Image (cartoon, rainbow, N blue to C red):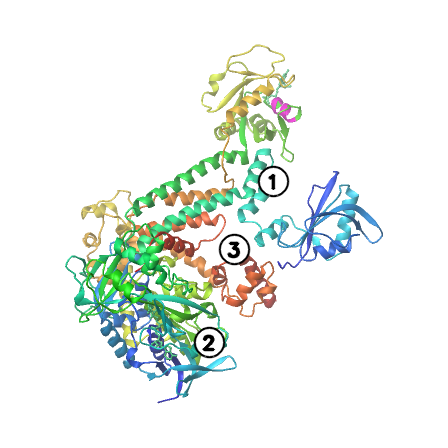
């Protein structure tokens, strides 16, 4: 085994594998060190990838040539496009995945990756010299050196599992926690907080009666997650829906005090959008029933994942309340639900490249930064991997602006605002939602990826062809204009205002569709579906997209106003002590980032702007 | 606590002979500087202390001096207020003495600017202070004061919070498409939206009315030459009409003159003046007067005899016949006045103001163009809300919030998420 690398990635979870692969793709000799090789790509919780907001992230990871989308396409057992009846900007592709197939796919993709070695072991310490990381020390005291290190240890730092009053140190069920490493981070003076999450029980499929339950079928049209795939070839199966009822609620309400969350034992913050069943019943008393999705864990799996009833009640109580639910009357729980508490590092400790401000060449990605979800973890992984690699050879940084991608929104939110609860992506977090769509993730980000060197040559070629097709398609539809009279001859009626319109203008009329327009511009038939799709979306959102593009110009103005790292905020004047402290800690790289920090008022932003400009002039003089 | 480089001072009262004058000093050095020219060396904050100001040779004046400690002061900085005697010589001497110290005269509006920067004032409040300083009439002053007490801030926040709840509901439909959201959510959204835009409409209407408080009413005076128009204007400008006061600083060039009548501003435009004093050809003069008549809130038509029908095209009007002192014949529907004896003038003015004055306006109003623009843009977006296209609806509501929030602050998505999570049981 080598003991010298450019980049070491610690942790083989969703952040870790993307980080390791992207670092290797960007050209660095990379090691992925993780506890158990056979757990690489393990889905700790829900066997599903994508959804609203999260689906966007998966597409963006793919646009940068990441592996998550490819693995999803190879394991998707139920595809659904959420919000399919709504506008393209808010559609979210979601896959129910086969846990085993997913893990296998990830393993295969990781092992095929050039420049990447996998090492089984537990990292117990970081080698830090002069505030710069130089490598890691394993459990057996072996030292491995590297120029950069990416830490992606998920829920493992001081992980503590709770079921009722029982507690157990663990990173997730069946895996030991990382205690020493957590302590080391504290010693390095990172600001550390505690969060909690939970998972529902697993149910034995053959003990469930599906007969009277509502079936949720897969979509007819399967859309692959990866831009390089044309199809999904896995058989598609259904999920089922059932509901809690009065009896369920009664049992839970009566035993609330046995849940460590309510007995006051757990104080750490859980995510509000991912409440335990205890929370749902306690906080929304007026709701008499809650929906539960019964999701298969795989094509051949004998387990069912009951999405909607995560809990930390004692096992017996879980059994009692589950059996009040329709279809689950005689169900057997194979693994009880549990809550887990873990350490996370305040992401305000990081720069936009995910490097820590305290220790050079050390990067953090994934749940360690206070996020939750595979997609959120993988998004940070790919960015941290690229930057860890860049750091070894140049002083370039790879940062996706908020105006270009959800990944940019995610990281910018984390490093400028921090987080108090596990952070999850939503489409509403993006102020440019109409422009940042799942369908155009490659058009937005692949060029950036090609520039920085993290995109394989095959994908690059394929992308260049597609983007050429799209350019030509747009040229075609913009250049040909038709008067109302000309349209009428082909049976298309619009107001006779004498105005000549191009295809995009025409498509924005609700009664005009692409097939109709093929009559007046037969060349349209020659365009491929992905080109037509982009044209139709542009037409549908016409004025709105232009307005958002204008907003982006404004945004970029503020983003282009860099705040020098050396800025002494005490000298800015007219800032309160609290504000000075905040700004000195976060060191926002731009005026825009400064204005997004919570508590920074418009007046303070103006003062800062004045100060930067004044200093610039001084320097210039 | 607040860092401010320079210490500034200004006379806060009008220069000129008056009983007392007030100096304000603000900035880091304010306390030490005032102590260095005081007989007293200790000051309790927020208490007026009897104190002699000294200039090295002796006592300048006996004053009441109040120290304020940052951030509890108007500007948010350390401040001192000195009430001294109002004579010009005292004022000059204090100014001179201060200028020898590390301190400079404040620029116009600088105290308010500092207050704004130190977050002691919202943008609306700062604008209101400007309005207050520039208030010409009693009613303008009253509006400004009521806005300063935070009424507008409250109103903007109220609308903005309602809009945020509306957006939260729409975003919940988008981002939680898979959850069992309440069935009534669409109906609720429509109701909320209607509620909000009705409120905004109402405010716009009310504000437009009260705009006249701000801009006042315009009254055009028309009539044949020599019917006594200029004399009438002259009379109300110069003679004592008890309910009329001059507004200092407004030009009374006989073309237009502004008067404060019972607290409101009235601007009289004398079309005769246009012709006579601007030396324009008669025709243009007449065209101008018609144009002016068209735009004004009310027209006063001076009659020679009984040529009412000549003016049938003029919309809102009152007929007047002047020179009552020489010809006591009254015509029905025509006000008789005399600019010599003053006969009928006060009743005429009362008629004018009762014609123009609308019902008293209740509730806070927006008086600035910037605010009105924001309200109107926001209204337009909300009124055209279409939930069938939910993504575009969300975009429109978002933008409508930006307009309202832009009146005072910034848009923050975290607030929307907070609302979603507290209102809906979401998550699996
Ligand atoms: C119980 C539970 C419930 C969850 N519930 C939800 C949910 O409801 N919704 C949701 O969106 N997400 C949920 N998640 C979160 C989701 O699983 C994570 O967000 C995601 O897996 C995080 O990815 P990661 O790469 O950061 O970490 P992980 O996937 O946790 O991977 C961490 C990896 O690091 C390795 N490692 C740790 N320490 C060391 C060390 N010292 N040396 C070597 N290797 C190390 C581990 O072995 C592991 O392979 C849940 C997770 C858990 C555990
Ligand atoms: N006796 C008397 N003379 C008046 C009165 N008003 C105006 N006049 C005279 O009428 C003439 C024309 O007045 P003026 O105000 O210039 O009329 P205008 O052309 O309508 O503006 C002047 O000689 C005035 O002195 C009035 O109320 N009584």
Q: What is the x, y in percent for residue A446?
A: 33, 69
Asked whether the viewer can see residue A435, the reply is no
Taking the image as shown, residue B84 lies to the left or right of residue B369, namely right
Question: What residue lies at 58% left-to-right and 19% top-to-bottom?
Answer: B347
Q: Which residues are magenta?
A: B231-237
For the residues carrying marks 1 and 3, which lies nearer the camera in this image? 3
- The residue that label 1 is drawn on is B134
**What secondary structure is found at the residue carrying circle 1?**
helix
Tell me how far mark 2 sits from mark 3, CA to CA: 35 Å
Q: Is residue A359 left or right of residue A450?
A: right
Name which of mark 2 and mark 3 comes first in the sequence. Answer: 2
Q: Quadrant of the C terminus of chain B?
A: bottom left
Q: Give the residue displayed 68% in from the left and 55% down from the top.
A: B7
Depth check: B319 or B414 in front? B414
**Quarter of the picture for ligand 1?**
bottom left
In the rendered structure, the answer to whether residue B188 lies left or right of residue A401 reads: left
Instruction: Write the residue at 67% across / 57% down.
Output: B28
User: Which residue position is annotated with label 2?
Assistant: A185
Q: Chain of mark 2?
A: A
Q: Which residue is mark 3?
A: A602
The reply to the same-chain question for discs 1 and 3 is: no
Nearer to the camera, B236 or A138: A138
Answer yes or no: is residue A277 visible: yes
Question: Quadrant of the rendered structure where residue A66 is?
Answer: bottom left
Query: Whole-percent x and y of residue A508?
Result: 28, 50
């Amino acid at each position: 085994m080598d003991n010298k690398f450019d980049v070491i990635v610690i942790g083989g979870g969703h952040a870790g594998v993307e980080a390791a692969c992207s670092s290797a793709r960007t050209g660095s000799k990379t090691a992925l060190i993780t506890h158990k090789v056979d757990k690489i790509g393990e889905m700790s919780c829900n066997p599903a990838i994508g959804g609203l907001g999260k689906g966007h992230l998966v597409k963006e990871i793919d646009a940068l040539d990441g592996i998550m989308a490819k693995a999803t396409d190879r394991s998707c057992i139920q595809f659904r496009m959420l919000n399919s009846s709504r506008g393209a900007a808010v559609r979210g592709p979601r896959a129910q995945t086969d846990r085993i197939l997913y893990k296998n796919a990830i393993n295969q993709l990781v092992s095929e990756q050039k420049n990447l070695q996998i090492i089984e072991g537990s990292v117990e310490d970081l080698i830090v010299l002069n505030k710069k990381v130089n490598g890691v020390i394993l459990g057996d005291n072996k030292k491995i050196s590297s120029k950069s290190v990416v830490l992606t240890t998920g829920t493992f730092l001081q992980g503590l599992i709770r079921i009722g009053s029982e507690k157990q140190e663990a990173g997730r069920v069946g895996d030991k926690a990382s205690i020493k490493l957590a302590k080391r981070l504290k010693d390095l003076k990172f600001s550390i907080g505690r969060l909690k999450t939970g998972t529902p029980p697993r149910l034995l499929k053959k003990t469930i009666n599906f007969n009277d339950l509502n079936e949720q079928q897969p979509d007819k049209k399967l859309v692959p997650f990866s831009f390089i795939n044309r199809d999904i070839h896995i058989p598609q199966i259904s999920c089922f829906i059932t509901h809690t009822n009065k009896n369920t609620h009664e049992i839970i309400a009566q035993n609330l005090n046995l849940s460590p969350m309510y007995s006051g034992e757990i104080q750490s913050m859980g995510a509000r959008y991912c409440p335990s069943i205890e929370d749902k019943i306690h906080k929304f008393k007026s709701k008499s029933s809650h929906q539960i999705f019964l999701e298969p864990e795989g094509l051949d799996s004998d387990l069912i994942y009951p999405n909607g009833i995560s809990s930390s009640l004692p096992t017996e109580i879980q059994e009692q309340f589950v059996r009040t639910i329709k279809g689950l009357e005689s169900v057997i729980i194979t693994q009880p639900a549990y809550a887990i508490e873990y350490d996370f590092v305040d992401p305000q400790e990081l720069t936009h490249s995910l490097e820590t401000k305290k220790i050079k060449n050390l990067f953090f990605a994934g749940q360690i930064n206070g996020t939750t979800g595979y997609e959120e973890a993988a998004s940070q992984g790919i960015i941290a991997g690229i930057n860890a690699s860049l750091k070894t050879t140049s002083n370039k940084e790879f940062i996706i602006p908020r105006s270009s991608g959800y990944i940019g929104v995610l990281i910018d939110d984390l490093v400028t605002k921090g987080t108090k609860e596990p952070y999850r992506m939503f489409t509403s977090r993006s102020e440019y939602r109409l422009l940042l769509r799942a369908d155009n993730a490659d058009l937005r980000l692949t060029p950036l990826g090609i520039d920085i060197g993290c995109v394989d040559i095959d994908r690059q070629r394929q992308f260049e062809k597609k983007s050429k097709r799209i350019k030509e398609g747009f040229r075609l539809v913009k250049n040909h204009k038709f008067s109302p009279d000309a349209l009428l001859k082909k049976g298309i009626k619009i107001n006779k205002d004498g105005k000549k319109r191009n295809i995009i203008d025409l498509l924005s009329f609700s009664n005009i569709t692409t097939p109709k327009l093929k009559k007046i511009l037969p060349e349209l038939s020659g365009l491929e579906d992905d080109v037509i799709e982009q044209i139709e979306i542009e037409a549908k959102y016409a004025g709105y997209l232009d307005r958002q593009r204008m907003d982006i110009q404004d945004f970029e103005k503020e983003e282009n106003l860099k705040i020098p790292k050396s800025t002494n905020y005490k000298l800015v004047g007219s800032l309160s002590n609290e504000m000075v402290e905040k700004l000195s800690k976060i060191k926002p790289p731009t005026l825009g980032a400064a204005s997004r920090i919570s508590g920074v008022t418009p007046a303070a932003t103006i003062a800062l702007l004045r100060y930067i400009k004044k200093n610039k002039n001084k320097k210039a003089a | 606590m607040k860092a401010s480089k320079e210490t500034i001072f200004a006379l806060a009262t009008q220069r000129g002979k008056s009983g007392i004058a007030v100096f304000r000093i603000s900035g880091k050095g304010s306390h030490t500087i005032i102590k260095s020219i005081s007989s007293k060396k200790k000051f309790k904050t927020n208490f007026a202390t009897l104190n002699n100001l000294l200039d090295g040779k002796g006592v300048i004046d006996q004053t009441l001096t109040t120290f304020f400690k940052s951030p509890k002061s108007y500007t948010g900085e350390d401040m001192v207020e000195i009430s001294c005697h109002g004579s010009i010589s005292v004022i000059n001497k204090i100014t001179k003495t201060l200028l020898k110290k590390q301190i400079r005269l404040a620029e116009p509006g600088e105290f308010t600017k500092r207050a704004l920067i130190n977050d002691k004032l919202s943008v609306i409040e700062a604008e209101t202070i400007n309005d207050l300083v520039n208030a010409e009439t009693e009613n303008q002053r009253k509006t400004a004061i009521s806005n300063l007490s935070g009424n507008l801030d409250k109103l903007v926040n109220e609308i903005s919070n309602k809009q945020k709840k509306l957006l939260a509901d729409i975003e919940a439909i988008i981002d939680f498409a898979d959850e069992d959201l309440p069935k009534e959510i669409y109906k609720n959204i429509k109701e909320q939206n209607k509620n909000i835009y009705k409120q905004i409409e109402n405010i716009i209407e009310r504000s437009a009315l009260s705009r006249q408080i701000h801009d006042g009413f315009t009254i055009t005076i028309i009539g044949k030459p020599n019917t006594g128009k200029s004399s009438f204007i002259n009379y109300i400008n110069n003679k004592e009409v008890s309910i009329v006061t001059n507004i200092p600083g407004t030009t009374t060039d006989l073309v237009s003159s502004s008067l404060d009548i019972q607290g409101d501003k009235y601007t009289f435009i004398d079309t005769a003046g246009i012709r006579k004093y601007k030396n324009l050809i008669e025709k243009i003069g007449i065209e101008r007067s018609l144009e002016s008549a068209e735009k004004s809130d009310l027209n006063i038509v001076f009659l020679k005899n009984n040529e009412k029908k000549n003016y049938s095209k003029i919309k809102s009007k009152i007929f007047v016949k002047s020179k009552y002192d020489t010809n006591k014949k009254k015509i029905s529907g025509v006000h008789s006045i005399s600019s010599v004896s003053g006969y009928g003038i006060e009743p005429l003015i009362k008629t004018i103001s009762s014609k123009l004055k609308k019902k008293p306006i209740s509730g806070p109003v927006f008086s600035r163009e910037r605010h009105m623009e924001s309200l109107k843009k926001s209204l337009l977006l909300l009124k055209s809300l279409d939930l069938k296209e939910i993504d575009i609806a969300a975009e429109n509501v978002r933008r409508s919030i930006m307009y309202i929030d832009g009146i005072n602050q910034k848009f923050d998505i975290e607030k929307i998420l907070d609302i979603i999570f507290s209102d809906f049981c979401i998550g699996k």
